[in-house]
Image (spheres, rainbow, N blue to C red):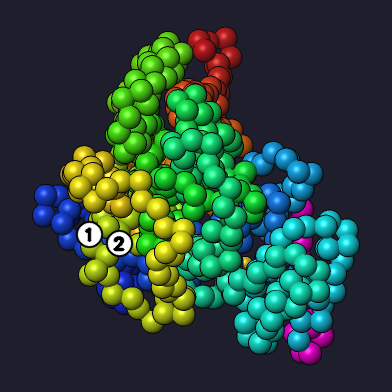
Amino acid sequence: MNVRNIVLDKYSAKVYKNRKEHIMELTQETKDQPIAANSRTVPGIITNRGCCYAGCKGVVLGPLKDVLVLTHGPIGCGFYSWGTRRNKAKTEDGRNFIEYCFSTDLQEPDIVFGGEKKLRQAIKEAVEIFQPKCIMICSTCPVGLIGDDIHAVATETEQLYGISCMAFSCEGYKGVSQSGGHHIANNTLMKKIIGTNDTPPKNKYSVNLLGEYNIGGDGWEVERIMKRIGYDVISVFTGDGSFEAIKNSHMANLNLVQCHRSINYIAEMMKTKYGVDWIKVNFIGIKSTIQSLRDMAAYFGDKELAERTEEVIDDELANIAEEKEYYYSKLKGKTAALYVGGSRSHHYQLLLSDFGVSTVLAGYEFAHRDDYEGREVIPTIKEDADSKNIEHLNVEKDDKKYHAYLTDEQYEMLKSKIPLEDYTGMIRHMENGSIVVDDLNQFETDEFLKLLKPDIFFSGIKDKYSLQKAGVLARQLHSYDYSGPYAGFRGSVNFARDITMGLYTPAWGFVTPPWKNRSTLRASLAGGEE
Ligand code: SF4
């Protein structure tokens, strides 16, 4: 029996029927088969998934430093998501709300009589104390059930205080995971912010970095490299991002998509409405970073920019050469399993391969089929009942603001060379024999660990300690175990250093107490030998 079937075999018939669609053992044949993804979690299975509110407020909106993000609901949702994602931000105009947790802290009477009154009062206090230019109201589970009209309150707020205010109906039960929340956040950023200011870029190499949340300073490291080359980074969605910068993002000539899952909606809508092309980039990994920088240079088709790109690549590589070689010698031949949200399980495989580490298992919590199989499967994806309550926004060309950097001929010519409006997905880059699992749960984690015996398991905080108790190094790829940055050239060696330290820590040698390995009892017969 293959590894996949050994794990599935332990399930009841009903659970087996569901889970068999989400697990693949890759072979030449299965690589072309569809995987089930973005569907409802089996109740009671101990999933790692979060909710729609987490995807909207926690992931996309939370990092916007000059926005006061107000959680409308009981205190748990706001409190638990307070400061737990490491999206860093520098203060620019005195407004940096990243370190706060704003909540309406709903109580029983608010559930019974409605929470709008309390929401208005919270906004009044927030305006008086913090003077934000923009407030975003995020709904939690009960808000949708009791029927609070947060959108009406947002409109009222704009009229009353003359500031921007927008509401997000991202109740936790919408969709099946964080993914619905990404979509809801994308729609409102597109409707209400993007395109509302027209400050021209500093030069024609103007880009937005989409789906980069600056965990541990990743976005800063990528920006540093891009600025060395000469790019004008207009906005980052949304790590160290700002409401003010996003207003101008439609002025860029190119969108760079790092996390496809969370932000592809905006990339697509900006292409339709403003003519801004997007390419899939990956700044995680040395070879991937080089490839992405070359793709960007190819897009702009400028000799000087291409030369500058190569100079910067050479210089950055020279700076990390010694460390790279050392960590390669320490990590070569190791194996890894990766289970992260919706993009890192792919990106980090490429970084690991730079250091000679191969992948035996990879999976996503909330990715869709296109993240696994590539964007060409999008027309074949059937939306199920659980995701139908997430709005699909249809945008149209804005005749006044539409600008295309490439001619149609240039576009067609480049399409075969760089990932223009394309993402090929994770599976295509994986070796035959490896396992792909969607919505991995605790039972499957334990089973695959025993069967595949990876040297390192990359995952999140919830399973980190159960993995380490089983004797395997677990590194968190959401929080980077409070380290980072891991992006770009310098980030790659930071990452390699961290896993080398984890693998070679002497603590692993003390897991088994000495009396389990050798006899510690000594006795001697009176007057005799020991
Ligand atoms: S599921 Fe509901 S209650 Fe739980 S964190 Fe999400 S919004 Fe809050």
Question: The magenta stretch spans which residues?
Answer: 99-113
293 lies left or right of 434: right
Q: Nearer the viewer, residue 510 or 291?
A: 291
Confirm whether residue 42 shows in the render: no
Q: Secondary structure at mark 2?
A: helix
344 lies left or right of 1: right
Q: Would you call the spot at circle 2 few (<14 residues within 10 Å), some (14-19), or many (20 or more)?
A: many
Which residue is at 56% across, 41% downward? Answer: 214
- The residue labelled by disc 1 is 376
Q: Secondary structure at mark 1?
A: helix
Which residue is at 62% across, 82% downward? Answer: 144
Which-is-in-front pick, marks 2 and 1? 1
54 lies left or right of 380: right
Question: Which label's residue is closer to the chain start, 2 or 1?
Answer: 2
Q: Nearer the viewer, residue 405 or 17?
A: 405
Q: Quadrant of ligand 1?
A: bottom right
- The spot of residue 41 in percent (x, y) is 42, 70
- The spot of residue 95 in percent (x, y) is 77, 48
Q: Amino acid at mark 2?
A: Arg
Q: Is residue 103 above or below residue 1?
A: below
- The residue labelled by disc 2 is 369
Which residue is at 15% across, 57% downward? Answer: 32
Confirm whether residue 341 shows in the render: yes
Q: Amino acid at mark 1?
A: Glu
180 lies left or right of 147: left
Q: Is the C-beta of the residue carrying label 1 under 8 Å from the nearest atom of ligand 1?
A: no
Give the distance between the C-alpha atoms of the residues marked 2 and 1, in whole angstroms.
10 Å
Q: Is residue 86 above or below residue 268?
A: above
